[in-house]
Image (spheres, rainbow, N blue to C red):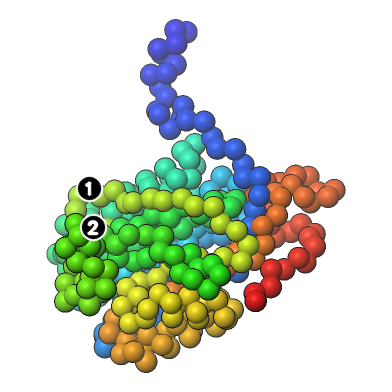
C-alpha cells in the first residue's frame, strides 16, 4: 500500500506521538467550596474535579480541577457553568493521543461550542455563558487553561503568584499602560469580561504550564474571592491552614467583606513529589499514587 493511502486515513492526532509517562508524581490534598455570598439570589459558580483511578489514564492525563463562574439571568448562568464543566471533563479524558496541553485547550473549545450551541438555540438560555479556569496536574507539570477572570494562583513561601491573566477590559487597559493594577482593581468596569465560554461561536483559551514542587499550593477561584480579598490575604490564609479549613476561612472573609458575588475557591496542595516507579516489588505503574506502599516523608508547613 502506498504511503499516501495510509496517511490519508490518519488525522494529525493519530500521527502525534503520545507523551512519555511522567517520571515523578505528586501526592496531593484537595479541597474546594462554593458559596452564595451575601447579595446574590443564585449561586452561578461551580467547581468540579476528576482524579482517575486507572493508572494509564492518570499517566496520560493526570488529574483535573476546575472552577466556572456563570452569567446570564434566570438561572441560565448556573446551567452554563454546569454544562461547561461537564463538557470539559468529558473532552479532556476522552481517548486520543493528543498531549495533555492540547487536550485541555480542546476541552475548552468543546465546552465553548456546547454552551454556545444551547445559548443560541434555547430561548430561555439566551446569553448564558461562564468564565472558567482549569488545572491539570500530570506528574509534576501543572497545565492551566482559562477564559475570563476566574484565576489560578501558586502560593509558595507565603506569597501568591498569579498564574493567569484576566481576560477583562481593565486588564487590557493595564497592558496598554492606561491603568495601573491598583486602578484596575478599583475600576467600576472591572467586571467587564473580554473572553468567556459560550458567548462567541469560536473561542480559544489561554494555556500556561509550570512545574510544581512539594509545599506549593495551587488555588483556583472565581472573582467573588479576588474582588473582596487581597492576594497577600489569600496567600496568608492558604499558607497557614489545611486546604479544607482555608477554603472555609477564605469564604468567611469574602463574606465579611460584603460578599458581593458568589465565591468559589479550590485548593490543591502538593504534599510530596516522588519517583513514579518507586513501588518496590510492585509492577512499575506510572502515575499511580494511591495503592503503593510508601514512606511517610510528609512535607511539614513551617
Ligand atoms: Mn463572579
Residue 165 locus on image (x, y percent): 32, 59
Query: Which residue bears the numbered disc 2?
Result: 175
**Which mark is in front, 1 or 2?**
2
Q: Is mark 1 within 8 Å of ligand 1?
A: no
Residue 157 locus on image (x, y percent): 56, 70
Neighbour tally class for label 2: few under 14, some 14-19, many 20 plus, Cα within 10 Å: few
> Is residue 169 in sight in this rendering?
no
Residue 113 locus on image (x, y percent): 27, 51
> Is residue 213 in sight in this rendering?
yes
Q: Earlier in the sequence, mark 1 or mark 2?
A: 2
User: What element does badge 2 sit on?
Assistant: helix
Residue 277 locus on image (x, y percent): 74, 47
Which residue occupies the extreme top position in the image? 2
Which residue occupies the extreme bottom position in the image? 256
Query: Which residue bears the numbered disc 1?
Result: 202
Quarter of the rendering occupied by the C terminus: bottom right
Residue 163 disc label: none
User: What element does badge 1 sit on?
Assistant: loop
Marks 1 and 2 sit apart, C-alpha to C-alpha, by 24 Å
Q: Are marks 1 and 2 in contact (CB under 8 Å)?
A: no
Hey, which quadrant is residue 22 in on the image?
A: top right
- Point 52% across, 31% down: residue: 17
- Point 35% across, 71% down: residue: 222
- Point 27% across, 68% down: residue: 181
Indicate left or right for 7 with 300 as reference.
Answer: left
Neighbour tally class for label 1: few under 14, some 14-19, many 20 plus, Cα within 10 Å: few
Indicate left or right for 218 with 207 as reference.
Answer: right
Amino acid at each position: 500500500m502506498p504511503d499516501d493511502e495510509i496517511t490519508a486515513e490518519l488525522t494529525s492526532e493519530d500521527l502525534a506521538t503520545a507523551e512519555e509517562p511522567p517520571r515523578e508524581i505528586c501526592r496531593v490534598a484537595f479541597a474546594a467550596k462554593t458559596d452564595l455570598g451575601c447579595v446574590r439570589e443564585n449561586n452561578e459558580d461551580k467547581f468540579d474535579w476528576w482524579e482517575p483511578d486507572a493508572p494509564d489514564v492518570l499517566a496520560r492525563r493526570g488529574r483535573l480541577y476546575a472552577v466556572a463562574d456563570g452569567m446570564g439571568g434566570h438561572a441560565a448562568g448556573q446551567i452554563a457553568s454546569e454544562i461547561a464543566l461537564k463538557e470539559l471533563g468529558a473532552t479532556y479524558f476522552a481517548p486520543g493521543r493528543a498531549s495533555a496541553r492540547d487536550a485541555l485547550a480542546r476541552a475548552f473549545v468543546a465546552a465553548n461550542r456546547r454552551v454556545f450551541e444551547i445559548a443560541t438555540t434555547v430561548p430561555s438560555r439566551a446569553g448564558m455563558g461562564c468564565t472558567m479556569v482549569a488545572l491539570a496536574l500530570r506528574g509534576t507539570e501543572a497545565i492551566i487553561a482559562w477564559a475570563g477572570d476566574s484565576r489560578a494562583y501558586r502560593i509558595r513561601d507565603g506569597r501568591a503568584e498569579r498564574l493567569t491573566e484576566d481576560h477583562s477590559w481593565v486588564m487590557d487597559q493595564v497592558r496598554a499602560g492606561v491603568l495601573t493594577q491598583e486602578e484596575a482593581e478599583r475600576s467600576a468596569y472591572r467586571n467587564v469580561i473580554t473572553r468567556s465560554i459560550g458567548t462567541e461561536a469560536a473561542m480559544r483559551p489561554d494555556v500556561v504550564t509550570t512545574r510544581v514542587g512539594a509545599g506549593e499550593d495551587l488555588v483556583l477561584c472565581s472573582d467573588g474571592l479576588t474582588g473582596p480579598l487581597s492576594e497577600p490575604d489569600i496567600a496568608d490564609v492558604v499558607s497557614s491552614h489545611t486546604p479544607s479549613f482555608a477554603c472555609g476561612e477564605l469564604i468567611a472573609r469574602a463574606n465579611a467583606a460584603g460578599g458581593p458575588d458568589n465565591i468559589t475557591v479550590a485548593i490543591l496542595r502538593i504534599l510530596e513529589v516522588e519517583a513514579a516507579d518507586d513501588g518496590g516489588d510492585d509492577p512499575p505503574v506510572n502515575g499511580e499514587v494511591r495503592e503503593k506502599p510508601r514512606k511517610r516523608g510528609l512535607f511539614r508547613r513551617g
